Amino acid sequence: MGMTLTEKILAHSSDSKTVTPGDIIFSNVDKAMIHDVSGPGVIKVFKELEKKGHKLEKLWDPDRVWISEDHFVPASDRISADNVIQLTKWAQKYGIKKHFKYGMGQYGICHTISHEEGLVLPGEVYVGGDSHTNTTGAIGAFSAGLGHTDIAYVLKHGKIWFKVPETVLFKVTGKKPDYIMAKDIILNIISDIGTDGANYKAMQFSGSVIDGMEMEERFTLTNMTTEAGAKNGIIEPDSTTVDYLRTRLGALNFNLIKGDPNAEFSERFEYDCEKMEPSVAKPYSPENVVPVREVQGTEIDKAYIGSCTGAKLSDLRSAAKIMEGKKVKVRTEVLPAAQSIYMKAIKEGLVTIFMESGAVIGPPTCGACCGAHMGVLGKDEICASTTNRNFPGRMGHVTSQTYLASPMVVAASAITGKLTDPRDL
Amino acid sequence: MVLKGTVHKYNRPNIDTDVIIPGPYLKIHDHDELAKHAMEGMDTNFINKVSKGDFLLVGHNFGCGSSREHAPIALSKTGIKAILSPSFARIFYRNSIDGGYLLPIEIEENVLEKIDDRDEIEINLDTNTVLNATKKESYPIKPFSKIISDIIEAGGLFNYKIP
């Protein structure tokens, strides 16, 4: 029996010839990431261990580690300012050079930085101290989120245990209509399988629609595998992957590892993209998905275009196309996911389009998506958002409501002040 | 190992990490401070209800959402020693074990209906059963896999020796 791509990567990383779903393995990790929430957590774990006599003078390989400042930048208060100071000193002590600092050139949301900077390559094992680390799996890597104790362990030992997941295959075919985005596709998938439909499993995407997708759209798919409980999301690398990485890294040779032709998937789902409708996930669950037209006209208080899910360059282009020459009817915030994307959006004239529509442009940060700062929702407020979660209180007050949708749907809703299918604008 | 305590029941599936410890507290790394806000998204009086050694009984997919280790930390610092649920989200599960905070214990779906809020129970990890002292009933629990029980015994991942 052959192995899926996830199984092949995990077998290689654990020096095994083969692995089978359910096996417990220790994987050698290629890359690791921490941010301004998980990083201080790691520091605390190190301090406690040192008190107990553990020797932690050196990391396994500081060149394979990077740090993003994203959740609480710009500093929301003195505690978050102190966290960044502490993290900076710690990074210097341990020799971590890839520290994407707010206000010092390239920085942004950790997952966006990981792909924007080409930090993870096909076939690698990458772990990050954030649940949406699954995002980077679209490059053809095994990419999974962990808590800060596990990440601390990786930073010290360069390895971590995994239970080899079974792989579920999602094949998306048909002619993709212009108004359907990757966000609509993944929302429909989560609607079918539920928020624990892929718990402990790998979600792999394939089919002609995926083949024809640019990398940024593919990252939207793998990003939201987390919302189905998946251990990782993955897409086999192809020429689109290579082009994306070459643009960032130059003429490197990549190991385009793929799954075996006779690999066994635990389940297979097929979707005809032509039949899909622009969709929203209603409060309070990402599985609560309906076509926009079913809730069309629901008044909103805010439109939010931001986060690792919905503020990549392609997301901003899609939103700008809809908002160009029109005025917003509700408070609208656009926060590009990384400094590099912000710069490209300025050069392409997208920022001008957003500002002329009346929207405010904010610096890259996760703040509002997780209800932490920089635009949290008040009591009973309703938001159309390109983000990934809409649990109670996720974006602010516990009675606030978030409708998750594609950048096109959110842009159309910003213009009308109501949930709107972009075809009906 | 036998654990005795009072059950606090929240019979709702998919209780997520934003409910267990809301986003604004992610910047806090003082564990006792986090405990004050445990379950704040659902029950602002939680901290006052719980005593050391108590248990949570919750619906399936407990701890879904973010990888924030603040979630098991906050719960364990309120005194919660174990959580009984038909299933756990994967990162919450491994954070609970690898950090050595509390025990995520899997039960059958129907057990959720058999145990009530404030029941006194005994969890026996040697026989893999729960004895409901209030109702004089007992129920099976799913045994931990070998690596999980070894990490628990070691007191967390950093003390675990790879075989």
Image (cartoon, coloured by chain):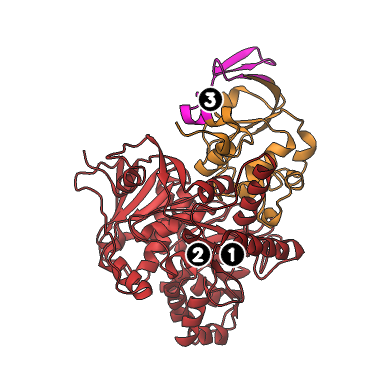
Chain colours: A red, B orange
Look at mark 1 in the image and give the residue it sits on.
A366
Q: Which residues are magenta?
A: B121-150
Label 1 marks which chain's residue?
A
**Where does residue A39 sit, x and y in percent of width and height?**
61, 56
Residue A239 in the figure: left or right of residue A359: left
The label shown at residue B110 is 3
Residue designated by label 2: A308
Q: Residue at x 47, y 34 (%)?
A: B162
Callout 2–callout 3 Cβ contact below 8 Å = no
Nearer the viewer's eye, disc 3 or disc 1? 1
Disc 3 element: loop
Mark 3 → mark 1, Cα distance in angstroms: 39 Å
Q: Is residue B13 visible?
A: no
Tell me, yes or no, whether the highlighted magenta stretch contains residue B122: yes
Q: Earlier in the sequence, mark 2 or mark 1?
A: 2
Q: Position of residue B64 (x, y in %)?
A: 54, 45
> Label 3 is placed on what type of residue?
Asn
Which amino acid, mark 2?
Answer: Cys
Name the element at disc 2.
Answer: helix
Residue A339 lies, with reference to residue A2, above or below; the image says below
Chain that bears disc 2: A
The answer to whether dots 2 and 3 both sit on one chain is no
The crowding category of the residue bearing disc 2, from other C-alpha atoms within 10 Å (few below 14, some 14 to 19, many at least 20), is many
- In this view, A71 is above or below A353: above
Discs 3 and 1 lie in a common subunit: no
- Chain of the residue under label 3: B
Mark 2 near mark 1, Cβ–Cβ under 8 Å? yes
Place of residue A174 in the rendered image (x, y in percent of width and height, measured from the top left)? 25, 62
Whether residue A208 is visible: yes
- The residues bearing labels 2 and 1 have C-alpha atoms spaced at a distance of 8 Å
Amino acid at dot 1: Cys
